[in-house]
């Protein structure tokens, strides 16, 4: 019988990281709706949906569960796929993909999806001292 992979992160850590990513994408969509005087809750699924779907794809493509808090190995690919995939899905569903929105979305999602991982890495580094 094969021995379990001892380097695999605990399931709780994987679920927490995925949950943080989803919540941050939904917050991004809610802030965007509110900043354009759109009802923050009504229509939130329509706005967040393409980005959440792309986030899931980003997790699958990057095998994020292997290192869910890794900045470069997971955070960067998940961010790229979330932005690119979200924009493609928005275009396909007839939602706007103006250049200014792409720039803002890419910047905010970089700060959110990669940023929390940077903070987690810094905290983990301090704890190991």
Image (cartoon, rainbow, N blue to C red):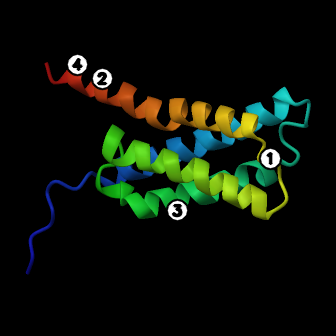
Task: Using the image as rendered, state which of residue 18 and residue 46 is in the foreground.
Answer: 46
| CA distance for labels 2 and 3 | 27 Å
Q: Secondary structure at mark 4?
A: helix
Which residue in the protein does label 2 denote?
Answer: 122
Quarter that holds the N terminus: bottom left
From the image, tell me which residue sits under label 1.
44
| Residue 84 appears in the rendering | yes
Circle 2 or circle 3, nearest the eye: 3
**In percent of the image, x 59 and y 57: which residue is there?**
54
Residue 19 point in image, percent of width and height: 52, 47
Label 3, on which residue? 57
**First-in-chain label (1 vs 4):** 1
Residue ID for mark 4? 126
As measured in the structure, the alpha-carbon distance from the residue carrying label 2 to the one carrying label 1 is 32 Å
Q: Earlier in the sequence, mark 4 or mark 3?
A: 3
The residue under the point 53% across, 59% down is 56
Label 1 neighbour load within 10 Å: few <14, some 14-19, many 20+:
some
């Amino acid at each position: 019988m094969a021995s379990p992979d001892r380097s695999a992160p605990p399931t709780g850590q994987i679920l927490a990281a995925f949950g943080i990513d989803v919540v941050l994408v939904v917050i991004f969509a809610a802030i965007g709706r509110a900043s354009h005087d759109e009802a923050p809750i009504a229509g939130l699924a329509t706005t967040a949906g393409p980005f959440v779907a792309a986030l899931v794809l980003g997790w699958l493509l990057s095998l994020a569960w292997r290192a869910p808090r890794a900045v470069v190995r997971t955070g960067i690919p998940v961010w790229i796929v979330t932005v690119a995939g979200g924009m493609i899905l928005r275009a396909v569903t007839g939602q706007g993909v103006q250049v200014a929105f792409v720039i803002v979305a890419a910047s905010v999602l970089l700060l959110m999806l990669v940023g929390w991982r940077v903070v987690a890495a810094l905290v983990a580094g301090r704890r190991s001292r």
